[in-house]
């Protein structure tokens, strides 16, 4: 789909994206570049990085890839510094690296739980920590009156509860807490805006293939208010909005982009039956004898 934003809305900005080589992260990388930003992507697999950088450059997007693991502070520091060395500055950090898989709680080992926490929540904080020096107002490559932007990719699983997702629910709850607390502290001290996006089910992603494989006969769309899966483009457009000047007064907010799915509940009664039931209940209420108060005097 055609973007509703001006092509140069991110002109002159430099963005670093973890998990930016595939899935939702790559779509955000691509849209940032198409709207004027220079893009650095970080990931653990060189082949994926090389392929993503090649694709971005085919659109004439200034792009570079750096191998690294968000769980390792030395990797985080090296990639941040390499990004600044390559492009001269850092304006936007997007934390999109994540781990996920379906597993019942009793079958999830503490090590498996810890791994997802380390990638999603500890990794998010580690990247923010290492990028602070370059994102804060007056930092290297920045002016004295403005700060950069951080965008954390979260989820809606922890808003209620989710089957077989205790590890990710815990990790994303922590990510949302990181978003709010850094927005308070770093927004106040350094003029850095920190926000999040909580995607719902997005078609053609690794997440969907893991969490809703073809082997599962899912009728999830029947319960979705908009009755359809989202697209990676939907998440990327929300990201462009939040990191651009269009979102300059938004700080500490995580926006669900899920078509309203997190609000939905099973339909206990078909709509056609609601009027009949309501009339029957009202009729019984009118026909019921009215009990008059009695006095003990």
Image (spheres, grey):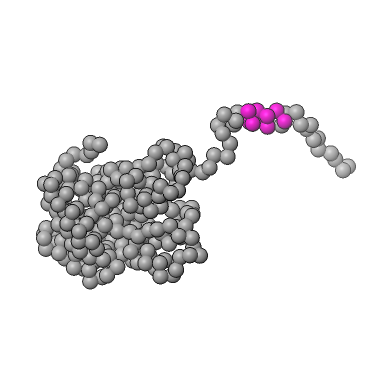
Q: Which of these two is toward me, 32 or 97?
A: 97
Q: Is residue 254 above or below residue 228?
A: below
Q: Is residue 146 above or below residue 266?
A: below
Left or right, 6 with respect to 156, comes to left
Task: State the residue in front, 249 or 242.
Answer: 242
Q: Main secondary structure of the magenta part?
A: helix
Q: Quadrant of residue 149?
A: bottom left
Q: Which residues are magenta?
A: 276-284
User: x and y percent of residue 197 in the render?
Assistant: 33, 50
Query: Where, quadrant-wise, is the C terminus in this rendering?
Result: top right
Q: Residue furthest front?
A: 215
Residue at 31% x, 62% y is 124
In the drawing, does residue 119 fall left or right of residue 262? left
Left or right? Give the position of 282 relative to 226. right
Which part of the image, by quadrant, shows the N terminus?
A: top left
Any magenta on residue 206?
Answer: no
- Number of labels in the image equals 0
């Amino acid at each position: 789909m055609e973007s509703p934003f001006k092509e140069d809305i991110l002109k002159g900005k430099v963005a670093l994206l973890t998990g930016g080589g595939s899935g939702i992260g790559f779509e955000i990388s691509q849209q940032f570049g198409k709207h004027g930003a220079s893009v650095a992507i970080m990931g653990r697999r060189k082949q994926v990085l090389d392929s993503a950088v090649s694709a971005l450059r085919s659109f004439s997007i200034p792009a570079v890839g750096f191998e690294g693991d968000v769980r390792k502070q030395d990797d985080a520091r090296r990639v941040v510094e390499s990004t600044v060395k390559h492009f001269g500055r850092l304006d936007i950090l997007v934390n999109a690296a994540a781990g996920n898989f379906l597993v019942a709680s009793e079958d999830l080992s503490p090590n498996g739980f810890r791994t997802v926490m380390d990638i999603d929540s500890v990794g998010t904080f580690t990247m923010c920590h290492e990028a602070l020096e370059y994102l804060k107002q007056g930092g290297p490559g920045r002016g004295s009156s403005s700060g950069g932007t951080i965008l954390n990719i979260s989820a809606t699983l922890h808003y209620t509860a989710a089957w077989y997702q205790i590890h990710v629910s815990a990790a994303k709850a922590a990510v949302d807490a990181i978003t709010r607390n850094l927005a308070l502290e770093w927004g106040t001290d350094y003029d850095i805006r920190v926000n999040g996006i909580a995607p719902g089910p997005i078609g053609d992603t690794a997440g969907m293939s893991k969490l809703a494989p073809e082997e599962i006969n899912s009728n999830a769309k029947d319960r979705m208010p908009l009755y359809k899966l989202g697209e990676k483009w939907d998440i990327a457009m929300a990201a462009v909005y939040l990191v651009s000047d269009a979102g300059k007064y938004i700080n500490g907010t995580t926006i669900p982009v899920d078509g309203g799915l997190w609000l939905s509940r099973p339909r206990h009664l078909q709509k056609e039956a609601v009027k009949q039931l309501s009339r029957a209940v009202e009729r019984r209420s009118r026909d019921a004898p009215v009990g008059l108060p009695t006095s003990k005097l």
